[in-house]
Image (cartoon, rainbow, N blue to C red):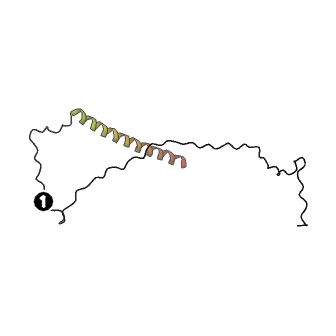
């Protein structure tokens, strides 16, 4: 213990006071606790019970076929305008595909012309 140098206090510091802490110049903001009210958790979905098969497994019986009444309305037929629109859309699609192929073939010839 005798080999230790004497404790020299800082100049200007009062005797018996603890040494000053280093200050970084930044003020630490005080953290605040914020409580958020959340909505309650949803309850579980209702359980759906499925029918169970008899112990012997499924039977080979088929239900009786459902008979249609004769007074049911006939399905709506495709009108003439709808038919014309279907064919016009098909022709427009074919023209579009043909145009794309023509552009690629034309560009291929142009590119080959530059590389020769």
Is residue 69 positioned above or below 15 on the image?
above
- How far across and how far down the image is residue 43, in percent? 37, 48
111 relative position to 47: left or right: right
Which image quadrant for residue 74?
A: top left
Q: Residue furthest top?
A: 81
- How far across and how far down the image is residue 33, in percent? 59, 44
Residue shown at the point (70%, 44%) measured from the top left: 28
Residue shown at the point (12%, 39%) measured from the top left: 72
**Viewer-proximal residue, 111 or 73?**
73
- How far across and how far down the image is residue 116, in percent? 54, 49
The residue pinned by badge 1 equals 61
Is residue 79 positioned above or below 107 on the image?
above
57 relative position to 94: left or right: left
Residue shown at the point (44%, 45%) measured from the top left: 104
Residue shown at the point (51%, 46%) measured from the top left: 111
**Viewer-proximal residue, 84 or 101?**
84
């Amino acid at each position: 213990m005798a080999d230790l140098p004497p404790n020299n206090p800082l100049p200007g510091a009062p005797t018996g006071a603890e040494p000053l802490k280093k200050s970084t110049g930044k003020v630490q903001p005080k953290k605040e606790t914020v409580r958020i009210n959340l909505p309650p958790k949803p309850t579980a979905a209702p359980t759906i019970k499925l029918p169970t098969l008899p112990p012997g497994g499924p039977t080979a019986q088929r239900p009786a076929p459902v008979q249609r009444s004769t007074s049911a309305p006939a399905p709506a037929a495709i009108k003439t305008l709808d038919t014309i629109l279907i064919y016009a859309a098909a022709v427009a699609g074919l023209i579009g595909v043909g145009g794309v192929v023509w552009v690629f073939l034309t560009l291929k010839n142009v590119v080959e012309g530059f590389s020769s």
